Amino acid sequence: MTHISRSALVMHSAERMFDLVNDVKRYPEFLQGCQSTRVIAENDTMIEAELTLAKAGFEQSFTTRNSLRRPDLMTIQLVDGPFSRFTGTWTFQTLSEDACKVTLELDFEMANRLTGMAMATVFKQVAGMMVDSFVKRANEIYG
């Protein structure tokens, strides 16, 4: 199993960062490796979406259901995709009115070991850059 843990101190509110991460439709605009997204269902407490990642000649789609507790927590569960296991959390810890700590924790294992090794490498690269990508996007949008 692969574990990814990334965090950053951000000079934006937890609410703004939560909303940015929850805006799945815009991921292809700024998230390197994210080719497309499709929101399947959403309400105030959850969003279910399909993401397609493409990098280095590999393309893979997967669907997750994120439970939302605005503004401090998103819990990620696999619905469908090439993983035998996939769970994660985004946490947004308020530090002040205009600052927070953003943390992404992911645990995953590919279902098919042969093709999974290559895709796991791509997924690790994309996931490893996600926090940085969201921080950069927040700075572009919010200043």
Image: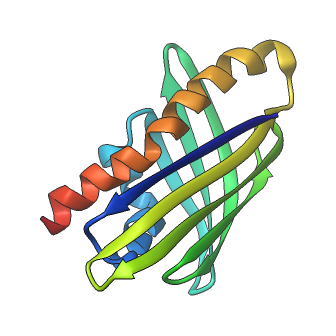
- Residue 58, image x, y percentages: 57, 19
- Spot occupied by residue 89 in the image (x, y as percentages of width and height): 65, 61
Q: Is residue 140 left or right of residue 102?
A: left
Relative to residue 50, is residue 124 depicted above or below?
A: above
Residue nearest the observer in this picture, 45 or 72? 72
The residue under the point 32% across, 63% down is 10
Image position of 68 with respect to 49: above or below: below
Residue at the image point whose x is 58% and y is 83% from the top: 43
Query: Where is residue 91 drawn, in percent x and y?
Result: 55, 68
Determine which quarter of the picture holds residue 139. bottom left
Which residue lies at the image location 55% right of the left edge and 39% below the top edge? 52
Count up the numbered dots: 0
In the picture, the quarter occupied by the C terminus is: bottom left
**Up-down: is 48 above or below 50?**
below
The residue positioned farthest toward the left in the image shown? 143
Q: Is residue 125 left or right of residue 81?
A: left
Q: Residue at x 44, y 32 (%)?
A: 33
User: In the image, 112: left or right of 126?
Assistant: right
Residue 110: x, y in percent?
80, 30
Of residues 58 and 104, the one nearer the viewer is: 104
Q: How is the image coloured?
A: rainbow
Q: Quadrant of the N terminus?
A: top right
